[in-house]
Amino acid sequence: MIYIALLFVMIVAVLITVLPVMRKTDLIFLDDMSDKSVPLEERKRSVYKTLGEIEFDYKMNKLSEKDYKKLNTLYRQKAVNLLKKEREKSGDIDKEIEYKLSQLKKRGNV
């Protein structure tokens, strides 16, 4: 009876170890940093860090070329979008400063 239980435990252990390796699935990364409550600078830092990790994993042969290209493209696009948002935000600030200055000039305070 003990031998049967040990055999069963060994089979389960082997299956748990081997099955994930045998499956052919694409990598899926969940991006928890897309939440708007997270500051833009933090999201940008996270994307840059992820890009570095993707590059490192590829060079260490932990990622296939297909997965590397897919992830690299995805996170580069995220970086571009974040930079665009940052530029829009700074442009809005510039416009607000110019507006405030023009208001002060009209009043004769500047």
Image (tube, grey):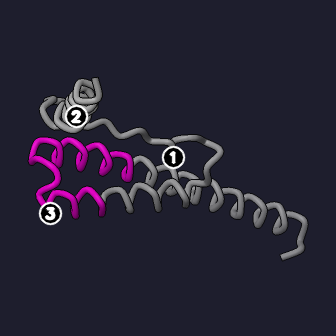
Three-letter code, disc 3: Met
The residue carrying mark 2 is 10
Q: Earlier in the sequence, mark 3 or mark 2?
A: 2
Q: Nearer the viewer, residue 84 or 56?
A: 56
- From the image, state whether disc 3 or disc 2 is nearer to you: 2
Q: CA distance from mark 3 to mark 2?
A: 32 Å
Residue drawn at x 21%, y 29% as measured from the top left: 7
- Callout 3–callout 1 Cβ contact below 8 Å: no
Circle 1 — which element?
helix
Q: Which residue is mark 3?
A: 60
Magenta range is: 52-80
Amino acid beneath label 1: Met
Which label lies toward us, 3 or 1? 3
Q: Is residue 58 left or right of residue 12?
A: left
Dot label at residue 33: 1
Callout 3: 10 Å neighbours few (<14), some, many (20+)?
A: few
Q: Secondary structure at mark 2?
A: helix
Q: Nearer the viewer, residue 98 or 67?
A: 67
